[in-house]
Image: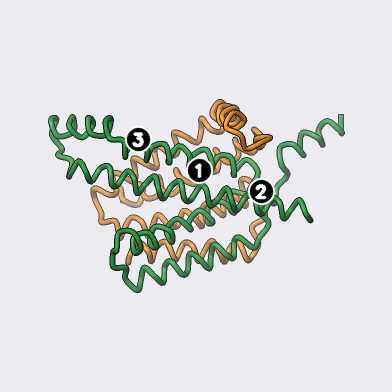
Amino acid sequence: MASEKRLRIKTLIMVLAMVVSAVVGDLLLKRGMSEAGAVQFTGHGLAQALEHMATSGMIWLGICFLLGFMTTQMTVMSWADYSYVMPAGAFGYALQTFLAVVVLHEAVSAKRWIGVALICVGVVLVGQTKPRTTEAAQQVAEKAVASC
Amino acid sequence: MLTVLLLMVLICGSTGGEIAISHGAKKTGEPERMRPRELLVFIGRVMSNGWFLLGIPLMAASFFALLILFSWHPLSFVIPISALSYVVGALGAKYILKEEVNVARWAGVVLVCAGVALVALG
């Protein structure tokens, strides 16, 4: 029982780290690309955009956060169910909306708030279920050794 | 017709890719400790796994389908439909990964799917 509680807490912490890394990474990329202005689809325009991407600290920081997202996602999926991690990760949409209101002072429509509320209820429902319903690789290996 | 085909590539590619990577990560086994060195070794092991190598082209195909769809249709059309990937993903988890998707998890998945569609429409 204690190990299940530990697994749930560990999974929720990793999902939260995954969501925050993805949202912050996207926000930094958006800020970084906005500094360059609209990209022109000409040889010169694309070359300028590439030069900006390679030299912008904001974009590199965004890439680091997205690498953090990839690492946390793969790590959490090594023990938790895909059908648990995937919907729980949608909490990022809610976080993005809160950040849009609090940081960017954007106006958010009623339809979007209803969507955020549905996502939050959905994530809470998924969060109540067992994070892992299949055997861990270690348990499978132990069983295989025992049967030999 | 081409739009329907690309939407299928988008949804099946992203969920198929994630399911393959998830399966690869589980086969690799979780890192013993959450330290940078252990995490790097773990990521290296996952990346050299065949399932990961199958997942990447699937996700790349999905990404290119998304880019093409964005150039043809508005965001408010593409994102709500792509939210179906939550339902397809849950089906894949149940039938391919053999995960237990109970009523509460199904209800959560459907609510998340509807919520993402509404957020995109809003």
Q: CA distance from mark 2 to mark 1?
A: 14 Å
- What is the crowding at mark 2: few (fewer than 14 residues within 10 Å), some, or many (at least 20)? few
Colour-to-chain, orange: B
Which of disc 1 and disc 2 is earlier in sequence? Answer: 1
Give the number of the mark in front: 1 or 3.
Answer: 3
Could you say which disc has been placed on residue B47 in the image?
none
Nearer to me, B5 or A2: A2
Give x and y (percent) for residue B107: 57, 66
The quarter holding residue B68 reads top left
Nearer to me, B34 or A1: B34
The amino acid at mark 1 is Gly
Q: Is residue B55 above or below residue A97?
A: above
- Residue ID for mark 2: B98
Name the chain letter of the residue that bears numbered label 1.
Answer: B
The amino acid at mark 2 is Lys
Could you say which disc has been placed on residue B16 in the image?
1
Nearer to me, A145 or B84: A145
